[in-house]
Structures are given as C-alpha cells and as structure tokens.
Image (cartoon, helix red, strand yellow):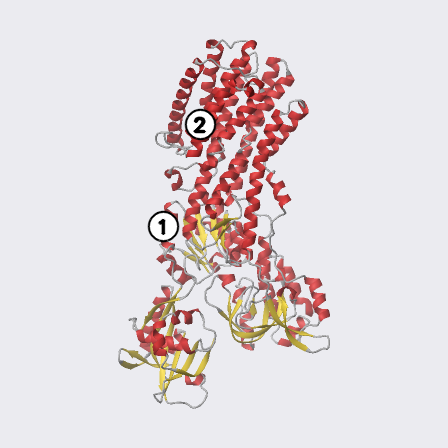
Amino acid sequence: MLKHSTQTVAGKAAGKGASAPVRVAVALEAFRHNEALFAALDTSAAGLNEEQIAERLDRDGANEVSHEKPPHWSRQLLRAFKNPFIIVLLVLAGVQLFTDDEDLTGPIIIAVMVAISVLLSFTQEFRSSQAAEKLKAMVRNTATVTRRASDGHSERIEVPVGELVAGDIVHLAAGDMVPADLRLFSAKDLFISQAILTGESLPVEKAAPTPAQVAEFGGRDEHDNPLDLPTVCYMGTNVVSGTASAVVVATGSRTYLGSLARTIVGQRVQTSFDRGVNSVSWLLIRFMAVMVPIVFLINWVDKGDWLQAFLFALSVAVGLTPEMLPLIVTANLGKGAMAMSKRKVVVKRLNAIQNFGAMDVLCTDKTGTLTLDKIVLERHLDLYGEESDEALEYGYLNSRFQTGLKNLMDKAVLAHRDLEEAAAHYRIVDEIPFDFQRRRMSVVLGNGDGNELLVCKGAVEEMLSICVSVKAGDEILPMTDEMRADIKAMTRRLNEDGLRVLVVAIKHQPPAKRAYGVGDESGLTAIGCLAFLDPPKDTAATAIAALHQHGVAVKVITGDNEAVTRKICREVGLDVEYSLQGKHIEPLDDAQLDEVVQRTTVFAKMSPLQKARVVKSLQRQGHTVGFLGDGINDAPALREADVGISVDTATDIAKESADIILLEKNLMVLEEGVLEGRVTFGNIMKYIKMTASSNFGNVFSVLVASAFLPFLPMLPLQILVQNLLYDISQLSIPFDRMDEEYLSRPRKWDASDIGRFMVWIGPVSSIFDMTTFWLMWHYFGANGPEHQSLFQSGWFIEGLLSQTLIVHMIRTRRVPFLQSVAAAPVLALTTAIIIIGMLVPYSALGAKIGMVPLPPVYFAWLAVTLLCYCGLTQLMKVIYIRRYGRWL
C-alpha cells in the first residue's frame, strides 16, 4: 500500500488541475529518509530493471503531456459547412430541386455561392494550421538514468525522456532539462531556472531535504506555491548549475506541467467574435423565418397559385439570406492574416484578427515583452550611493575568475569588456564556491606582488555580516552598526526601484599556502555594490502609448518579483498605483476579484490559474481581453483570453493555446494588429449592415407589390440573378479602407444596433421602390399582366442599382464620394455591376429570365430616383449618428 501512495495521490490530483503538484509534494514530504522514499516508490538507488520499467510504462503510459493536434483536412472541410447561412442555403436548394427538378438555374446559383464560401474558408484555415505546426520545435530529449541490467549490475545510461517511469533514478547536471517531476535525494550547488513556469529571470536553489526542514514542511498546505518547494524539481525546467540525483515521482499528465496541459487541451471558450457572429446570424435568420411565410401567404391568397407563390417565397428567402456572410467574413479575416504575415506574425485562428480590433485590455507578461529578457548591470556604487568604478572592477574580477557556471548577473558584469586588460594581470589561486546558506562566493587572486587578494560578492546582509570596515573614498573606516543600517537603507531604496543588489568586499593577505575555506571570509573591507536590472525595451513605452491612444489598456500579469515589475512598469509609462500579488487575490471570491482587477495594473507572483482568473474577471466586466505570454504558466490564460498571443520561441503548449504567434516579441506588432483588426471588423460590419438594411427594405417592397399587383413583382430567377450580382458587388469590401475616426477606439459586436439600423435605414429604399412601382404602372403603362416583363425589368434595375449604391452610402459616416472615397477595388467592382445590371434587360440572359428592354426616358427617371435616394439616406445617416453616437 505504501509503495503506491505517492503515485496514487498524483493520479487523483492530476484530475484537479494545478493542485496535483501540491498534493504530490505533501505526500513526498512524509518521507524524510531516502530509504522510505525509495520504498514508497518501489525503487532503489540501483535503479529499476526491465520488467519494472515495462510494467510501469503499461500502467502510467509514456512520459508525455497532452497536446493538441490539427484536425485532418477532411474534418476541417466539413467544419467549414458549419454555418447557419450555409445550412439555410443548402436546404433552400434542396427544396427547389424537389419542387422544380427541370429548372436547375436556381440551385446552381446557390451551389456556386456555397462552394466559393466554403472553399475559401477551408483553404485559409488549413494553410494557417499548417504554418503554425511548422513553428513547433521537434526536439528529441534524453535523460541520464541509473538502471539495472539483466545481469543485476547498475549502470548509467541515456534514455528518451518519453520512456521515463515513476521510480527511475535520474542524474542532473548543468544544462539538463528536468525530464519529469523529481524528488531530490542528493544535490550539490543545484540551481534550477523555473522561468518557463514562473517567468522569474533568476534561478532558484534546490537541495535534498535535511532534518532541519521537517518542521518547515510540516506547516505547508496546498495554498502554498508548489514551485517554492526546495526538494522538488518540475518537468520542463532546466539546470543552471550544480549536480543532483533524484527519483522520478510523476510522469506525463501527472506532472505539474502535465496537469496544466490537461486544463487547456480541448474545446476553447467562445470569443467575442464567435458570440457576435452567432448573434447577428440568428437575428437575420429569425427575421427571414417570420417574413418569408408572410410573403408566401399573401401571394397564394392574392394570385391563387400556391406553387408559384411557394417558388417566389423561396426566391425571396434566398434573397433575404446573407449567403455571402461566411465568404465576406472569411475573406476579411484572410486578408488580415496575410497583412499580419508580412509583419512576421502567424495567425492560427482567423477569428483572432477581429478580436484584435475589439480588444480593449491587453494582459502581458513582463519578461521579454516589456523587458530585454536579460539582466544588465544598471549601477555600480560605493556604499554611500555614489558612482564607483572600483566596485565594478572588483566585481568584474570576482565574476571573471570563478570557475562555476556563471549566472545572469555574472554575465551582466562581464559585459564590461574594457576591464579585461586589468584582469589579465591576475591569476586564480583558489575559490570558495557559492552556496545558498552563505549566499556569497569568493575568488582568491594573485598578481605577483607577494600578496593574495580575496574578492567576495554576495547578498547584502550576508556580506555586511563579514565586513569589519568600509572604504570611503581613499579612507578605510570601521564598520559600525549605524553604518550597516545606513547601507541597508540605501540598498533597500534600490530594491524598491526594482534593482537586485550585490555587495562587493575585499581582503589583502599574505599567501595562505593552503586551500581557502569559508572561514577565510572574515575581516573584509566593503567596497561598494552592484545593482542589476532586466531593462525595458526601447519600443515598449512607445507601443504602450500607442495602444492607450487607440483605447487599449495594458495590464501586466507576471510570476516575477513585484518590486522589479513595478519599476519596469513605471519606466514604460504604466500606472503602478495599484499592484497585487497572487497570494492577495487567492482568497478573493469573484465579486471581490472583479472590484480589485478593474483598478489594478500590476499583478506579480501569479500562478497559472490565478492569471486565468484575472482574464475571466475582465471578461465578466465586459472587456475583450488579449493575453501575451510564452511559458507553460501562461497557457491557461492564453486559452481563456479572447485573443491569445505567443511567440515562436515559446513552449509547445503555449503555442498551441495561442491564436496568434509572433516571430518577434514586440508590442509594436500588436499595435499594428489592433488597427488591422479594426479594419477587418469595420469591413465585416459594412457587409452586415448593408445586407440587413437592404433585405429589410426589400421585404417591405415585396409585401406592398405582392398585395397590390395582379402579377409577381419579380420572377424567382430574376431575384436570384439580382441577388447574385449584388453579392458580387460586395466581394471587394475586404479591400476597402476605414476612416481614421473609426480606428481610434475598440469596436464590438452589438446585435441590437444591427436590428435598430435595419429599421432606420431599410425603409428608405422601400420609399423609392414604391415611387418606381408608381412610375412603371402609371407613366410607362406596365399596368397589366401583358406588361409584367416591363415592370419587372424596371424594378430589377432600380433595385440592383440602389442596393449597389448603398455600399458607398453605408461604408462611411462621412459624405461618400466627397469626404470619403472607397478604395479602388470597391469603386471598380460596384461600377462594373451597375453597368452590367443596366445591360441585363438588353441581353440574351435577360430574355431567358423574362426581361425586356426599357425605353431611354426610364434612365432619366432612374437617375433622379437614385439621386434622391442617396440624399435621403445621407440625411437619415446624420440623424442616426446624432441620436445613437455610432454608425458602423
């Protein structure tokens, strides 16, 4: 029972998200001695044999975390049909085939519309998913393990990481990736970089447990951060320095990384784009479902021919269906994706382009986004806070001559290569390595003058405790308690500015002629201090200002230190009046969290699920949220966000969770994406409002004409041809431009505004449809069944031209053609459709579908009608904008 206890705990916890590592760690801390730990996992220091390995692989599976794979192309193609308008069109085509199997013109027109839309959508989605897959690094990692051979002897061998099992004995060295969740049983100077999990730039020390730690671990509970456990190393992290031996306690989905992966693989939440398209789609479908039966009943009762009335009602249904909505939406999104690809951005999910435009809050990590993702030496000071080259010189000697793996701060010091010439006069005599208890390290140097120089560098308090004097200018002064307090106050101020501080001290002495040890670190003279910072990017402040200018608030959510984060945020222009740590928001319920999230800019020391909670809180408050991150710790938040953004150097799970992958981690690209998203959204809204208002007006016109005419106002085929020409005129909309004022703030879906727009603008076209009815009936003598072709031809042209002109009227809140001119493709295509529409009654196609040529004087009346129509529409536009404050 004992031997399976930890694995059982891990297995149960894995189903409960990120609490699994806490439960595993708590179970493991019950075993203070290696023998008890090995017994619990049914292993030994000699490792596992082949039989045990095979049994555990069969029981637990491969050491792999869950990850998403792109669906097969056939599933992607079928998914392209999953659109309510596509389904409606297919149903209408089927009904037409069933009721009139001799005339295939209508079904063919519908099939062409559906095919173009589906193929374009499928092609763009498939190409995007293939490009995103190519970005994922395919790296085969191995681990060093001790295993028992068939003859009973143990040996160290390299095995693929995927073949590790619970109970394996793993050996770590500098540069290794941690291959599974491990419990240490021996370690020397082991430092682990957990940046992939926490975003923290500096490595943390890990060590095997000591009896002195029993009381400390006994007080832990599962609200503590499992990443703070010093005896446990987590899958996906890497060894910066030192060596260790450890036993595998969890593999695959049971690991900390695996438990997070399980929470993010699967069905994504609906984004604001999805919700917006659905709301608009069902609004138009409900409108069609109400009006089409009314048209059928009126024509059946009035004309007495139910089949003719039914076919006419079906044609009206096709005319009312915005069948080009999927095509226009996909074309707009595809054009946006192509524009972004030129800026080194891969768009995995097309919806993300529009969500960029709707985004009003961007949540981002700090490291590598706001900062350069590397530690730099910000200041070198004496212990009175003045600039000191001497402190830098001695710090350089310490970093230059240490033999261990140099950390980020050592590399920052060594960047001052101008000091290499001075260092060349020294040679290494000995060193006293760093350890976490002392929190300092020393090198002993000689330069041939008969004495040896001990240079020590370390944390403030630990260094001050071994210093007996301080250098002030050219003087050596005794170190007093008051002076220690002043130095601590000075370094504390540096900490509050987000700087990490190390003190440098020296001691000159005759050669010891023996190995140096910790006891030699005494009687030192403090020279000064070195202050380090992960500096902000030059472009960060500009990008944040640009995002603010376009109505996007920026919040920083990081696992890094709060003081450092506040410093960076101040430097890039963010308001840091309010900041919170993960431990502060953990006990808050949703209502309390919503209250503090709204006013807080900086969230530090955040766990993965805490990050996701903040994103969901913002969404509850009506925000469209973007999240930029690259670690496994960012993956849940990336998935919850309306638009998840990652980089090509990110972890696989982060890239899978993201909607957009940047080939360069730069906020300026995001600002461009916001504008591209708003252009995309604006062009989509143009189509929806054009179609909705035109359809609403056409229904009024059809109802009036059906009620008073002794014949059908337009034949079913004429409606289909008119509708196809009108749809073609709108295919250029994705290439249109947007006015500057539209791009100045976030844009969101609002189905109620679309319904209101239909009611206000749609009836305007009906007014001029009715004047055309009157002219055709009274002026042109089309007042009987024998003249119905003339009537239908006249309304065909007027209806098509008014619908086409509405493209220019609705595309801008300004005066069209004078204050705002459409892009060249829009002008060219709408002009071509107007010319083609006027020529149809004179063509063989017109004769085939029952149309006749019109007298020349008709076009004079047509010009007056269209001019008045544009003028009245512009007047209604001005009134609408003044009343509701918006247009598109």
The quadrant of the rendering that contains the C terminus is: top left
Residue 712 placement: quadrant: top right
Dot 2 falls on a residue whose secondary structure is helix
Residue 426 visible from this viewpoint = yes
Residue 831 is labelled as 2
Dot 1 falls on a residue whose secondary structure is helix
Please report the residue visible at 63 percent of the width from the left and 57 percent of the height from the top. Answer: 15
Up the image or down, 208 lies above or below 521; here it is above
User: Tags 2 and 1 in contact by the CB under 8 Å rule?
Assistant: no
Closer to us: 745 or 123: 123
Closer to us: 755 or 795: 795
Frontmost of labels 2 and 1 is 2
Around disc 2, counting alpha carbons within 10 Å, would you say few (fewer than 14), some (14 to 19), or many (20 or more)? some
Residue 591 visible from this viewpoint = no
Give the mark nearer the N terminus: 2 vs 1. Answer: 1
Residue 483 point in image, percent of width and height:
31, 76
Residue 866 point in image, percent of width and height:
42, 21
Up the image or down, 252 lies above or below 671; here it is below
Measured in 3D between alpha carbons, the distance from the residue under mark 2 to the one under mark 1, in whole angstroms, is: 41 Å
Residue 603 point in image, percent of width and height:
44, 57
Please report the residue visible at 45 percent of the width from the left and 64 percent of the height from the top. Answer: 201
Circle 1 sits on which residue?
A: 545
Residue 674 placement: quadrant: top left
Residue 122 point in image, percent of width and height:
58, 41
